[in-house]
Amino acid sequence: MKRAWVVLAVLASVVVAGCGGDPTKGGGGGGSGPLAIGSADFAESELLMELYAGAVRSTGAQVQTRPRIGSREVLVRALQDGSLAVVPEYAGNLLNYFDKDATAAKSDEVYAQLQQKVPSGLQVLEKSAAEDKDVLVVSKETAERQGLRSMADLGPKCGDLVLGAAGEWRGRWEARIKQLYGCVFKEIRTTDPAGPVTVEALRSGQVQVANLFTTASAIGVNGFVELADPKQMYPAQNVVPLVRQSALDDRGRQAVNRVSAALTTEKLSAMVRRIEVDKATVADVASGFLKENGF
């Protein structure tokens, strides 16, 4: 309940900031005010937000950043109501959000279907080669004790195990993992979106399975075991900018697409590690990448 009030408060602040003029129309878009670029509530999304913001600023546009606003549901609404102009997204999960029955799993198929399913008024720009997929992980001890190497191994044993995942996981994947792998967890415990709360819950044994992202530095640092997904429950998750169509001009779009073209999974993972392990600031890491790539 407390988190819900926090999300509402943040949204309210975004809307208030726009009173007297749409904050997303201007600079790189075709209005007089600054563009608002937002992120979800985790470090990688904030990093991508800063990369997009810096790229658009390089065109001479005014840009405001709105970090860690909330979940996908909140961000999409903010794009649709004009509070935001651009947010970083992940192709597979975004397709699933717009079409619960989508079956595409491979990168090009996911992107093609996503372009067709994005609601009127919104648009996805060019997808990046960089990918950050959801992945179920367990501790090394649990993997050895339970004989777990894949989600197929996990299925018959889910009834004895607690999953830690973001609140959205249940609605998106609970039925799907049961359908594909026969997995019904003993409990699904709400943690955070693949962040420190989830990691600590797995480390401490509060949960035995956790949903993380493949670029998460915590996987290697803690020796967690990634469970293979042979039936491709989690589709391709290429990084893709989701934009309000009227928000960016051609120069702004080209700038964001340049970021996507320069990103790779390896580069993204390395930047996330600098933030999460080396404790570099998101702004410094983003600035370094932009300078290296000619912005």
Image (cartoon, helix red, strand yellow):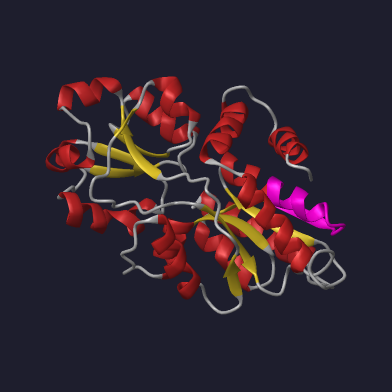
Q: Position of residue 266 (x, y in %)?
A: 53, 35
Q: Is residue 142 above or below residue 116?
A: above
Left or right, 172 with reference to 88: left
Judged from this view, the residue extending furthest toward the left is 156
How many callouts does the rendering have? Answer: 0
Left or right, 218 with reference to 58: left
Q: Quick one: 287 or 137, which is closer to the camera? A: 287
Q: Is residue 86 magenta?
A: no
Q: Position of residue 122 (x, y in %)?
A: 59, 72
Left or right, 126 with reference to 191: right
| Residue located at (60% from left, 63% from top) | 125
Left or right, 53 with reference to 5: right
Residues in magenta? 50-66
- The quadrant the C terminus occupies is top right
| Residue located at (37% from left, 52% from top) | 169
Judged from this view, the residue extending furthest toward the bottom is 120
Q: Quadrant of residue 242?
A: bottom right
Q: Position of residue 163 (x, y in %)?
A: 30, 40
Q: Is residue 276 visible?
A: yes
Q: Is residue 165 visible?
A: no
Q: Position of residue 38 (x, y in %)?
A: 66, 55
Q: Is residue 234 above or below residue 82?
A: above
| Residue located at (62% from left, 51% from top) | 260
Q: Is residue 51 magenta?
A: yes
